[in-house]
Image: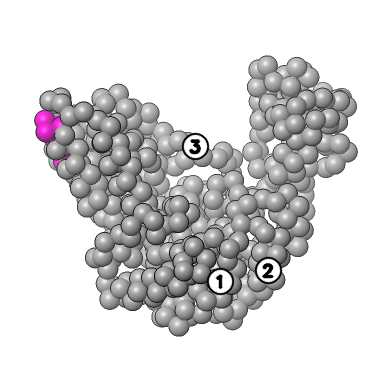
Amino acid sequence: MTKSRHIIREVEEGSIAWELELEPGDELLSINGNAIEDVFDYHYLVNDEEILLLVKKANGEEWELEVEKEYEEDLGIVFENSLMDEYRSCSNHCIFCFIDQMPPGMRETLYFKDDDSRLSFLQGNYVTLTNMSDHDIDRIIEYHLAPINISFHTTNPELRRRMLHNRFAGDIFPKVDRLYQAGIEMNGQIVLCKGINDAKELERSIKDLSQYLPHLKSVSVVPVGLSRFREGLYPLEPFDKEDACRVIDQIEIWQKRLYEQYGLHFIHASDEWYLLAERKLPEEERYDGYLQLENGVGMLRLLEEQVTEALEGQEGDDRRGTLAFATGNLAYPFISRYMEKIQKKFPNVQVRGYNVKNRFFGEQITVSGLLTGQDLIQQLKGKELGEYLLLPCNMLRSGENVFLDDVTVEDVERELKVSVKIVGEEGADLIEAVLNREAGREHKRRQMYEQTNCSYSGTAQCGKIHTF
């Protein structure tokens, strides 16, 4: 495997690296004589109080630099590739992969399927473990990296091979055993496919995975996402209300049993199941501290708690304003309810809500994170939007002002003739965006982890983009 070069992109002023006269374009060759595989090696080796750096300058000179510093003190280097290695692509061909359900003609990075364990630790991606070697497991244990997020889908080895279309996909459990024995914290997910890994197979999976408690802290069950671009793909059916009720009942029986034994509910149904079943969301305590937010488990409950808390700290007044919000079908009734709470305290703030259908991917896709700029423009054009339009930040690519279809926030503003505010993930962000005219003016989504050549940060987990 070709080793990546660790080229410095930026040196922070006043840092150790700045004092050592390191510059952009310099290449870090080794630390204490050890070659650096990736960002984890770098941070592990650079922690010591005394280190020896070998750096190749842009003119070809090699500098050997002795450094004395505080333990865990950073050098102040930003590398061109923040992972310090190539991203690992997925070797599976999952029957439910959302990336395979993307239409042609979109930006290239949207078709990149990552299955990189490093991104599990850095930004919460879920990985199948099929791409991991014993060396990778050794490093996780040596550095005690945690938590690692694992896409299980099923514990039936033969079924897992068929679902992932990979003859090695059923062989991951010796790796899971090693992580468990080393005390590495784990979280898991199951993308549920109707008639395939549900019912008896789901029962088997929950039973098997519960044996990894307490180090496997949680497992989420999410319904497969089906776009309208499935021609030639494995035939999958959507779940209906009756199906959702059965899944919830099955999970809640296990929650009660496992909580009595371990003090954790462990297995969690994503919010989508409760909305499909037309049932109330679980109370906050059932989410065990919200371990699976990125998989849509408890996101709506947490947002409601945050909105309620933020509103309690506000004194109502007679301020005036007119605005609108737009979101996907899944979150729409909840955001509408939060807006009603705001208007009770601020009766002269007028808010209109718009439930935007996902015509680009198909109306079975209900999460706001998969809405496109063109759907927003087409469905909101000519509507009463007031002084500004609120949009959730998860519609945008991380660190940018771009929707999935490369339409920009500025394009939406121009077409709809309204100012757009991008609302952060916290409940307080929503309150602030409604009440403070200046809040949310930044059009970019906050960047969680810098990627230079990886996929849309939706986050694509085993091909399914989980976000509200």
Q: Nearer the viewer, mark 1 or mark 3?
A: 1
Q: Position of residue 299 (x, y in %)?
A: 37, 51
Q: Amino acid at mark 2?
A: Asp
Magenta segment, which residues?
346-352
Q: Say which residue label 1 marks.
A: 209
Q: Secondary structure at mark 1?
A: helix
**Marks 2 and 3 in Cβ contact (< 8 Å):** no
Q: Is residue 347 located in the magenta-colored stretch of the structure?
A: yes
Q: Amino acid at mark 1?
A: Leu
Relative to 452, say whether 243 is above or below: below
Relative to 355, 8 lies left or right: right
Which sits in the foreground, 66 or 91? Answer: 66
Relative to 7, 255 lies left or right: left
Disc number placed over residue 172 in the picture, else none: none
Instruction: Please say whether residue 101 is visible from this viewpoint.
Output: yes
Q: Say which residue label 3 marks.
A: 447
Say which quarter of the image contains residue 79: top right
Q: Secondary structure at mark 3?
A: loop
Q: Secondary structure at mark 2?
A: helix
Which sits in the foreground, 46 or 185? Answer: 185
Relative to 97, 131 lies left or right: right
Q: How many marks?
A: 3
Q: Residues within 10 Å of mark 3 (few under 14, many from 20)?
A: few
Query: Residue sitting at 77 percent across and 49 percent down?
Result: 2
